[in-house]
Amino acid sequence: MSKAHVIGFGKSGVAAARLLKREGWEVEIGDNNTSPNLLVQQQELAAENITVKLGYTLELEGSHLASLPKLIVVSPGVPWDIPQLVKARELGIETIGEMEFAWRNLSTVPWIGITGTNGKTTTTALTAAIFQAAGLNAIACGNIGYAATEVALEFGGINYPSSNKNPLDWVIGEISSYQIESSSTFSPRIGIWTTFTPDHLARHKTLDNYYNIKAQLLRRSEFQVFNGDDVYLRKIGTSEWSNAYWTSVNGKEGLLSEKGFYIEDGWVVEKITASSAPLRIVKAEALRMVGVHNLQNLLVSVAAARLAGIEPEAIIRGVSEFSGVAHRLEYICTWEGIDFINDSKATNYDAAEVGLASVKSPVVLIAGGEAKEGDDTAWLGKIKEKAAAVVLIGNAASFFSKRLQEVGYTNFEDAGTMEKAIPRAAELAKKYAASVILLSPACASFDQYPNFEIRGDDFRKVSLEFVGK
């Protein structure tokens, strides 16, 4: 029996381990962390004859050849260039990401691969809603909460029951640069690129490297769809992507080619080929989400649906019934005329700028966490334009204080934690007659929370407790 090793004990790693076991591998899974919750999971997997090593880092130096794994599956959060993986590749050990492993078990099903710096989650969820409204069994997975390997465990693999009464029609994957980087054969039917701005540079080093990783997904896709209103993607334009479908909220004149999807007279309009007549698909106002960026998300989602052969009636139904995504400009409650909005998923400056641009002003902004590299100029400009006050939390508070002062913005204060930030933001909102209290952190969450979802959940909990007083 050949040995496989899974790095990372998250849900994608656990599902990968179970999928490997089902395929007949001798499986071990390692994680350098340990906790009571992980110990419970360790016991559960041990009962399935899967070895779990906690507080463990895979060592290949000096290992006897017979004891080496034949396959290593890497969870999305694990850097692709850590010494163990470099060594594994030198030794000829096949090393793949969990997305690639899921694809190998689901490659008979058509995929939509959605990547981009921002907009991935909303686009993935909206696309899935449209496909489901058309009566298709389409599952959203990847970075959106349902791991791709969990889908493969349920619907793919050599032991998948062919008699299943509800077979999978489409897989709609939110694909990060980390997952693309570790996938060698993953080839979606339709590839979507939502936006491109500097992010994850601590891992990818240069913007060119980050771009080329994301471009791999589109190059391997049968059809490519691009947000033509994104400044960087528009600059590259048709020089590399001459056969792609481009989108624009700025009418037909905004398209970079003779075919694409655009908004005109309040309608999403399709021009599927250079010679075809324009066709109105759905009114833009059917989408119940604010912001130009969500119209851009709507366009690429409709493009995917039409390329998959979905009729306009189903698209209208799916768009109209779509209520949005948790943690992305999510309405929580209203207190004395002030809306509390959770935008915890805004983990970089560009996403946070979009968050500010999408709500009414004046706004009281709650920002901070674990600061990322990137250009904060436009974000700071949007704060000066729309924020009556800024309440800071987390490790970035001192750095953000310095940057705000440097641009001449002085109405900020450091509350430290969410529990203190929300009542203070409410006081400031009353004082300045603000319409909105917006959590849009422009930061990762890891200084105070395991992930942005839990940070957003905390904002929701503390807000509702405050309003209930």
Image (cartoon, rainbow, N blue to C red):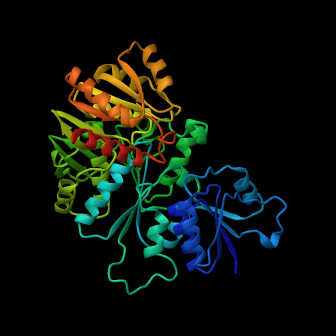
State the quadrant of the N terminus: bottom right
Whether residue 249 is visible here, answered yes or no, is no
Where is residue 70 shown, x and y percent of the image?
71, 70
Q: Please state if 449 lies on the left or on the right of 256 as rendered.
A: right
Q: Residue at x 32, y 79 (%)?
A: 166
Q: Nearer the viewer, residue 158 or 4?
A: 4
Q: Residue at x 32, y 83 (%)?
A: 165
In the image, residue 261 above or below residue 190: above
Q: Residue at x 58, y 57 (%)?
A: 35
Q: Please state if 212 lies on the left or on the right of 116 as rendered.
A: right
Q: Quadrant of residue 423?
A: top left
In the image, residue 53 above or below residue 298: below
In this view, the residue farthest toward the bottom is 163
Q: Nearer the viewer, residue 433 or 34?
A: 34
In this view, the residue farthest toward the front is 469
Where is residue 160 shown, x and y percent of the image?
46, 81
Q: How many marks?
A: 0
Where is residue 98 shown, x and y percent of the image?
55, 62
Q: Residue at x 44, y 14 (%)?
A: 405
In the image, residue 147 above or below residue 468: below
State the quadrant of the C terminus: top left
In the image, residue 293 above or below residue 375: below
Q: Nearer the viewer, residue 348 or 39?
A: 39
Whether residue 293 is visible here, answered yes or no, is yes
Where is residue 232 shown, x and y percent of the image?
44, 35
